[in-house]
Image: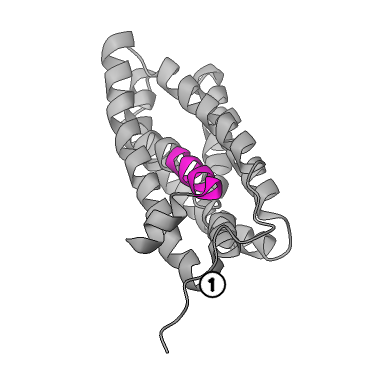
Amino acid sequence: LNTLRRAAGTRVFWYLFATFFVCGFTTNGLVGTHLIAFCGDMGIGEVQAAGLLSMMGIFDLIGTTLSGWLTDRFDPRKLLGVYYAVRGLSLIYLPYSGFSATSLIIFAVLYGLDWIATVPPTLRLANEAFGDRSGPIVFGWIVAGHQVGAAAAAAFGGTMRELQGNYELAFLIAGMTGIAAACISLLINTTKPAFEPEPQAA
């Protein structure tokens, strides 16, 4: 808890926490929970809609592996900016896609490639900011933000569906959070340690 207390006093922690909150909000919370129901509202059968999630899972493996490779070679802030921008634009695109087979496949491929691609650059940024010793601990607390975001989106999506009669506004708002996360990612500064490492016991 002492590491969390010290990390919570830094700007970089809250930037990473906020972006990972959006990650959970836009993946497990919204798409993972509500995509099948959204497709059902648009006349797509449950089996076909579930197939989209399966396709995302396949491309997720590819995207996450590629993201790890890219994170070792490029600025992780810029990678996060691209990932969240693509995610946000994909969510904004979906309600206007017509829900044709082609448009849904495009969405599933893009979203699958992007699903967990945010993890490698987020972990690298945490390690750069908080050190190899404290970074993984801080990242664990950042992951808590992901879970809070997922829970919030699950409730938010259902509430918007009840109030609006459809999921369109929920997906548009989630898309805008993705764009916001892309902008926040570019503000992260890890050129110097967020705090000095605690001295190790003799």
- Figure disc tally: 1
| Residue at the (43%, 57%) spot, across then down | 6
Image position of 181 with respect to 10: above or below: above
Q: In this view, does 141 lie to the left or right of 198?
A: left
In the image, 181 versus 86, the foreground residue is 181
Image position of 47 with respect to 9: above or below: above
Principal SS element in the magenta part? helix
Q: Does the magenta stretch include residue 12?
A: yes
| Residue at the (54%, 17%) spot, across then down | 96
In which image quadrant can residue 171 be found?
top left
Residue extending farthest top: 164
In the image, 92 versus 75, the foreground residue is 75
Q: Does residue 190 appear anywhere in the picture? A: yes
Q: Position of residue 200 (x, y in %)?
A: 45, 81
Q: Is residue 174 magenta?
A: no
| Residue at the (53%, 43%) spot, across then down | 15
| Residue at the (59%, 57%) spot, across then down | 125
Identify the element where label 1 is drawn: helix
Residue type pointed to by label 1? Asp
Q: Specify the quadrant that holds the C terminus.
A: bottom left
Q: Where is residue 101 in the image (x, y as percent from the top left)?
A: 52, 29
Q: Specify the quadrant that holds the N terminus.
A: bottom left
Q: Does residue 62 appear anywhere in the picture? A: no
In the image, 58 versus 48, the foreground residue is 58
Q: Where is residue 90 in the image (x, y as percent from the top left)?
A: 57, 31
Residue denoted by label 1: 132
Q: Where is residue 45 in the image (x, y as percent from the top left)?
A: 34, 29
Provide the residue span drawn in magenta.
10-22
